[in-house]
Image (cartoon, rainbow, N blue to C red):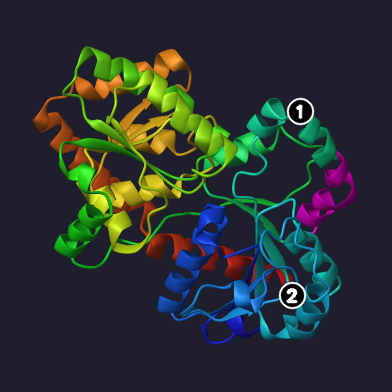
Amino acid sequence: MSALRNNTPLRLLQVVHTLRGESGGPAESVRRSTEALLDLGHKVEIATLERPEDLQAGENLTVHSLGIQAGDIGYGTTPKLIPWLKAAQHRFDAVIIHGLWQFQGWGAHLALRGTKTPYIVFPHGMLDPWFRNKYPLKHYKKQLYWWLREGRVLAGAAAVCFTCEEEQRLAKTTFFPYRVRERVVAFGTADPSGDPAGQHAAWAAHCPAAMERPYLLFLGRLHPKKNIETLLHAHGLWTAKDPAAPRLVIAGPGLESAHGKGLLHLAGQVCPAGSVLWPGMLTGPAKIGALRGCEAFVLASHQENFGISVAEALACGRPALISDKVNIWREIESDNAGLVRGDTPEEVVALLAAWSELNAEQREAMGRAARRSFETRFEIRHAAESLAETVLAVVKNQA
């Protein structure tokens, strides 16, 4: 293997269902980790189950689009993946598979078994027992799929990588039999670059109302697991008691969905008019401007593997107000980088109340601690180095 000779760069392939930003964490993780690994001198390519025409314009990474379907590719079965990967596997020291329950894992398993090229799997929180408890019928179907395919994919992996110890602990309880080679790998995001003044201007142009008074920021998909309903109720109670309370900005894709429309309707019922802003999905300078400009970031999720948006907020020096179902809550609490409570209605009310009781000096100190926490734990270069070390250990073990 080339990675064992004279410290030459690792040759890696990352396989992911889609690179679309609105799909959630795995796509963002693949992009950021690929950029960081390239900066460290490694050679990295990406394979997706999309068609070439589905990729965003101006893509600057090496991406192989192996899909044949348009739009929502669902499970993502494509006849191109297995033969392409069989033919290309000799060019890579290892293959990294992102996500479960879709064709990228099974296809890579079939293509790589019996070869000298090991593969690694990142579940990205998809083994969390919350899904079993919330959607029991889906869980029964997944358990069947686990017996047929997914359990075999993970059992055949040279390593199954978790982004924190909490994710690793929870994963053991969800499916059986559970036979995996576990590793905890550092995870994170890039330090925000660019001109802060320009980012502020981009955010102001995108959402002028956010400039009128302080705001808390939620940034993520509008999905039931995010517990936005409870956050809206808690914010409504706060603003009813204190009309000067900060606004709540809920930014993310999904407003047009049935769930998103339900959230809009609920906000109109439980929150004062104009106290909740819905700017949609944010990207680029406007996204960073929104993070830099908020009082604090808030995420009261029922389940969150890592919460890459939490790390982005810490990078901008913003405290994180999170539930203890966000798997990095212990790190946030230990670093005094935010406030942590449970995900029940009463506890989310308590979370916002605890923030409201802090004075300006305490909030500023928490913001400084948030930045230190990012630099120490979640900066993407640390994460890329940790991943490279894990891959190198796997490659040496295979040699």
Would you say the magenta stretch is mainly helix, strand or loop?
Answer: helix
Please tell me in which quadrant of the rendered image residue 334 appears: top left
Say few, some or many: other residues with alpha carbon within 10 Å of mark 2 (under 14 / 14 to 19 / 20 or more): many
Q: Quadrant of the N terminus?
A: bottom right
Please tell me in which quadrant of the rendered image residue 359 appears: top left
Which numbered mark, 1 or 2, is in the foreground of this view?
A: 1
Tell me what residue is drawn at x 59 percent, y 49 percent: 124
Residue 136: numbered disc: 1
The image position of residue 38, as x and y in percent, is: 46, 78
Tell me what residue is drawn at x 52 percent, y 68 percent: 388
Question: Quick check: 197 above or below 221?
Answer: below
Tell me what residue is drawn at x 15 percent, y 40 percent: 212
Q: Is residue 352 magenta?
A: no
Q: Is residue 150 magenta?
A: yes
Q: Which residues are magenta?
A: 144-156
In the rendered image, is residue 316 in sight? Answer: no
Element at label 1: helix
C-alpha separation, residue under disc 1 versus residue under disc 2? 36 Å
Q: Nearer the viewer, residue 162 or 294?
A: 294
Tell me what residue is drawn at x 35 percent, y 47 percent: 279
